[in-house]
Image (spheres, grey):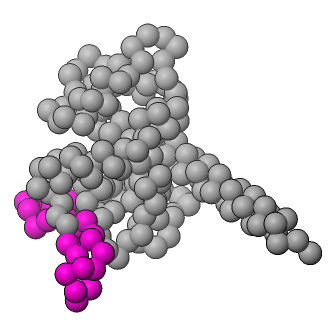
Amino acid sequence: MTTAKDLFIIAMDPDHSVGQGDLSLALAGAELIDLAGAGAVVVDGDRIVPGESPAPDDRLLREAAGGLVPQAPHEPVEDWLWRRGRDLAATYQAALEEDGELTRKRTGRLSLGAERVQPADTPTGRRAAERWAEKEPVLAALASAVGVDGARLGDEPGFEDEAVTTVMAAVHDAVMELEAVRQRRTIENAAFANVWRGP
């Protein structure tokens, strides 16, 4: 399993309510952290430079590594998050369902209730839960960035790895930017509705 898959499984907990856009950005950040940890990329300042090591043996991480900008000027981390993160939560859901890591269950007493995706009871799902219970710093920081545990943390613990610190800061900035866009749209829609209603 990868940090991104662990994050997705944690975010699927019925007790957590995570926006798909926020989660997609954090998943892209998790991929980048795993790729940097494997030496497949180097975070040089705020830019992503392909590394000398191959991507880890994971289909989605290989796909992510294959989408790197190979020549200078290399892509900034935040640009990567927005580009790679587009609909990434849906991609992870499909992959995890295919691997049997997620199951669909109907909610409510009737079999016609709404269908909900939830983590399956598998060794990899239990491993993700263990990482979460232990508050593994990278997983906890990514989960916090998307509001898991009910609040977004403003100050993350310091990371020894500069690449992790850079990526985490970019994830926070991107999630805040997305929230600002949502709020602006809400205000614009409310103003538009008021115009149509009239005085």
Residue 136: percent from the left, percent from the top?
Answer: 29, 58
Which residue occupies 22% across, 20% down? 53
How many circles with numbers are drawn on the protein? 0
- Spot the residue most to the top: 71
Q: Is residue 107 magenta?
A: yes
103 and 37: which is toward the camera: 103
Tell me if residue 136 can be seen: yes
- Quarter of the image that includes the C terminus: bottom right
What stretch of residues is rendered in magenta?
A: 105-133
Residue 115: x %, y % from top left: 27, 71
Q: Quadrant of residue 164?
A: top left
Give the answer, above or below, for where 73 lies relative to 33.
Answer: above
Identify the residue at image location x=14%, y=49%: 98
Of 138 and 26, nearer the camera is 26
Does the magenta-highlighted stretch encompass residue 3? no
Q: Relative to 116, say whether 72 is above or below.
A: above
